[in-house]
Amino acid sequence: MEIIIDDLSGGEVIQLLEEHLADMYATSPPESVHALDVDGLKAPEVTFFSAWLGNELQGCLAIKQLTSEHIELKSMRTAHSARKSGVASKLLTHVLNVATENGYRKVSLETGSQAFFKPARSLYEKFGFSYCGPFSDYTEDPNSRFMTKELADQQLS
């Protein structure tokens, strides 16, 4: 699997992000959906990664710089055809390694509190994320769970 920095110009990536947003709005009240649209993911403080197996999109994950030492994970999504194949773990490992290489010390995220998001929360827990309060511009929300992880200097394998 190849993971690249993506410019969000490909139709497969746009379609995957549209599925992601549709699921977010189907499972959470609109005021609790914090997923970025394509324009938001093209912001200068965001780096968007896509994962490919040959010409087939496997998944995506973005990081948004909050400060010089703190980033937020955004828009993590695995393609339906790649579910339960380890794509999410590979993407998360890659992004955490990139974050460490770039001197970031902390990674945070917001995800849903509903059962739909349980697999995501389990993955983040497996990677050492712990639950925390709201960060950045977030506020308390019963539909959100906030998680964070301090980065060590070593790389994940």
Image: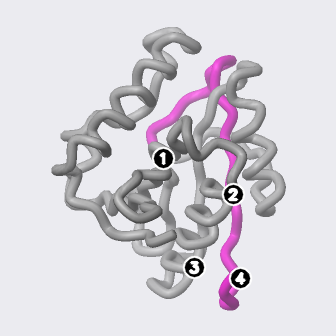
**Span shown in magenta:** 137-157
Which of marks 4 and 3 precedes in the sequence? 3
Which residue is at 69% across, 47% downward?
A: 147
Q: Does the magenta-highlighted stretch encompass residue 142?
A: yes
Q: Is residue 132 left or right of residue 62?
A: right
Which residue is at 47% across, 22% downward?
A: 33
Q: Quadrant for the C terminus, please.
A: bottom right
Mark 3 in CB contact with mark 2 (< 8 angstroms) = no
What element does badge 3 sit on? helix
Q: Which mark is residue 97?
A: 3
Residue position for label 2: 86
Please identify, in this view, whether the residue under mark 1 or under mark 2 is nearer the observer.
2
Which of marks 1 and 3 precedes in the sequence? 3
Q: Position of residue 111 (x, y in %)?
A: 62, 35
Give the image quarter of residue 131: top right
Mark 4 in CB contact with mark 2 (< 8 angstroms) = no
Residue position for label 1: 136
Nearer-the-camera pick, 5 or 138 = 5
Which residue is at 73% across, 45% downward?
A: 132
Q: Is residue 38 above or below residue 21?
A: below
Q: Position of residue 16 (x, y in %)?
A: 38, 37
As shown in the figure, which amino acid type bears the numbered disc 2?
Gly
Give the image quarter of residue 44: bottom left
Residue position for label 4: 157
Which of marks 2 and 4 precedes in the sequence? 2
Q: Position of residue 95 (x, y in %)?
A: 52, 69
Q: Is residue 115 left or right of residue 42?
A: right
Q: Residues within 10 Å of mark 4 (few under 14, many from 20)?
A: few
Q: Does the magenta-highlighted stretch encompass residue 117?
A: no
As shown in the figure, which amino acid type bears the numbered disc 3?
Asn
What element does badge 4 sit on? loop
